[in-house]
Image (tube, grey):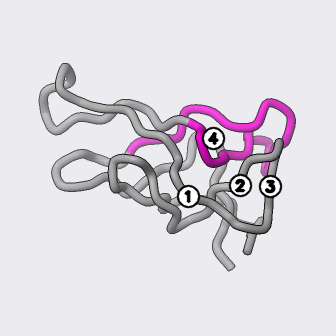
Amino acid sequence: MPSIVRQGDFCSGHQCFPPRPSENGSPDVLVNSKSKHRVGDKWAMHSCGDPTKGHKGVQLTGSSTVLVNSKPVARVGDLISCTSVNVQGSPDVIAN
């Protein structure tokens, strides 16, 4: 089972757009002292050289069986709106 993603964990980036951290998460569920990232939560801006031509992202996919605040939890390998995927997560909490 994949590790769950928390606020501040990084995505893969895509093409020349670098990896970046998740921006937010659950207001009341913490994992390893960090907010739990869920479908619909945001990713920081990243750009391919010109910061005025970057974009933010939104978590698109997550667990079909584990919910936090009625939203699917994000896990390593799940998709972000810009085609990046989650690559960093909790060292000791996993979800199906």
Q: Give the CA distance from mark 2 to mark 1.
A: 8 Å
Q: CA distance from mark 1 to mark 3?
A: 12 Å
Query: In the rendered structure, which amino acid carries the disc numbered 4?
Result: Gln
Identity of the residue drawn at 80% across and 42% down: 33
Q: Nearer the viewer, residue 21 or 77?
A: 77
Judge the density around disc 3: few (<14), some (14-19), many (≥20) Cα neighbours within 10 Å.
some
Instruction: Please give the name of the residue rendered at 40% of the width and 47% of the height, measured from the top-left corner.
Output: 81
Q: Quadrant of residue 34?
A: top right
Mark drawn on residue 72: 2
Please state which of the two labelled residues, at mark 1 or mark 4, is closer to the viewer: 1
Q: Could you tell me how far apart the alpha carbons at marks 1 and 4 are, in whole angstroms? A: 16 Å
> Crowding near pointer 1: few (<14 within 10 Å), some, many (20+)?
some
Q: Is residue 10 left or right of residue 37?
A: left
Among the two numbered marks 3 and 4 on one chain, the one whose residue lies closer to the N terminus: 4
Check disc 3 and report the residue beneath it: 67
Quadrant of the image occupied by residue 7:
top right
Q: Is residue 18 above or below residue 92?
A: above
The residue indicated by pointer 4 is 7
| Residue 79 screen position, x and y as percent | 46, 59
Q: Which residues are magenta?
A: 20-41
Location of residue 28 in the rendering, given as x and y in whole percent from the top left corner: 86, 34
Contact between marks 2 and 1 (CB within 8 A): the answer is yes
Dot 4: few (<14), some (14–19), or many (≥20) neighbours within 10 Å?
Answer: many
Mark 2 or mark 4, whichever is nearer to me: 2
